[in-house]
Image: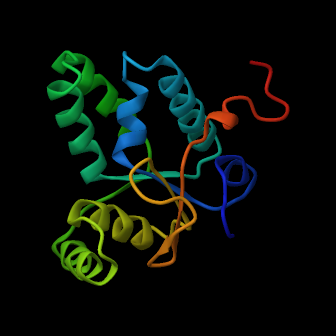
Amino acid sequence: MTNSTVSDAAESTKHVFLDSNILVYCADRHDSDLRARCRMHLQTLRSSGRAVISTQVLQEFYSVTTRKFSLDPIQAREFVADFRQIPTTVITPELIDEAIACHQADSISFWDALIVVAASSADCQLLLTEGLNAGQTIRGVEIIRPGAELINQPGDTG
């Protein structure tokens, strides 16, 4: 799939790895449009059983929302408990080693590389993120971004 969109992902059977920033935006009190868009994508992918995350995503969500957004730690923990229902790839020493190789070979940050290799190890063909270039494919995982035009998909009522 080349230059995929979230709508393409929603209509496919491909698994979609959700980057930390997508879940963080679900709790963002400052940008209601972005929050709504990310929540819609999360709901669509979860309900179809194609959403996947990693332990890194859960850790980063808690850290960023409590530090940057000053989300109450109890609320952040409730979000994490909910997100734990999504199939979750455990970050292992082997994945860390793969991420180091990806970081060096693909010239992306170590943390982005760890997300990419976690997505690849979970057999996800798509990575939904705001942090990498849309349309780029790294380690067999295509990068897609939530676009503003995707708030209302065909057939959506609201």
Total tally of numbered discs in the picture:
0
What residue sits 68% from the left and 37% below the top? 150
Give the residue at the far right of this rendering. Answer: 155
Q: Is residue 70 left or right of residue 144?
A: left
Q: Position of residue 130 (x, y in %)?
A: 44, 47
Which quadrant holds the N terminus?
bottom right
- Give residue 85's quadrant in the image: top left
Q: Position of residue 125 (x, y in %)?
A: 56, 68
What residue sits 40% from the left and 31% below the top? 25
Q: Position of residue 144 (x, y in %)?
A: 56, 55
Camera-side residue of 56 and 103: 103
* Vertical comparison of 109 with 32: above or below: below
* Vertical comparison of 140 with 149: above or below: below
* Vertical comparison of 44 with 124: above or below: above
Camera-side residue of 146 and 63: 146
Q: Position of residue 92 (x, y in %)?
A: 20, 69
Q: Is residue 129 left or right of residue 95?
A: right
Camera-side residue of 17 and 151: 151
What residue sits 44% from the left and 78% below the top? 139
Camera-side residue of 21 and 135: 135
Which quadrant holds the C terminus?
top right
Colour scheme shown: rainbow
Q: Is residue 146 left or right of residue 99?
A: right
What residue sits 43% from the left and 28% below the top? 26
